Amino acid sequence: MTDQTPRGSEPGSTVLDRWVDALEAELGLPPGTVDVGAVLDLARDAAHQVARPAAPVSTYAAGYAAGLAAAGGSGAAGGADGADGAHGADEVIRRAAAFALGWQDAGPGAATPAEQPAGEPR
């Protein structure tokens, strides 16, 4: 969401809307920066497919990766366009959700996708 309109000022707004507006202001983010639906969807996917504690960890990691991508500190979003701003965050959240939905725990001692030799299926 990047429409610059605080959610909490709209009729029918919820306490979550007002919290996110206040949090964006506290963190110095433009109004409407946080796509609440996408973040909650990622949290749901991680909690249900991986484990409940994966929800906050996944949303934090996605936010961190999106911030790095926006700052040019990493190719975390993996997009050819440099994945800046909201588009970078959207891509990171999409990738994280897809990763969570496809997650199959191979058990202790198994290689993580980053540790697997090239050419092996993930």
Image (cartoon, rainbow, N blue to C red):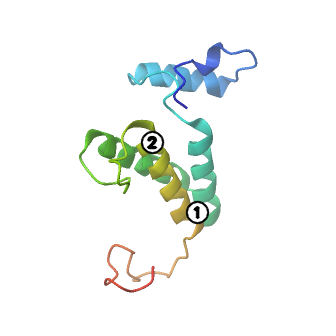
Report the side of 72 relative to 65 (left or right): left
Q: Amino acid at mark 1?
A: Ala
User: Residue 30 lies in what quarter of the image?
Assistant: top left
Q: Residue at x 55, y 26 (%)?
A: 20
User: Which residue is the site of mark 1?
Assistant: 51
User: Which residue is the site of mark 2?
Assistant: 87
User: Residue 71 lies in what quarter of the image?
Assistant: top left
Q: Nearer the viewer, residue 26 or 90?
A: 90
Residue 82: % across, % down = 32, 47
Report the side of 92 relative to 55 (left or right): left
* CA neighbours of label 1 inside 10 A, class few (<14), some (14 to 19), many (20+): few
Q: Is residue 34 above or below residue 41?
A: above
Q: Nearer the viewer, residue 47 or 64?
A: 64
Q: Amino acid at mark 2?
A: His
Residue 43: % across, % down = 58, 50
Q: Quadrant of the C terminus?
A: bottom left
Q: Residue at x 66, y 23 (%)?
A: 15
Q: Nearer the viewer, residue 45 or 91?
A: 91
Q: Is residue 73 above or below residue 116?
A: above
Name the N-terminal-most of marks 2 and 1: 1
Q: Secondary structure at mark 2?
A: helix
Report the side of 9 relative to 53 (left or right): right
* CA neighbours of label 2 inside 10 A, class few (<14), some (14 to 19), many (20+): some
- Residue 108 numbered tag: none
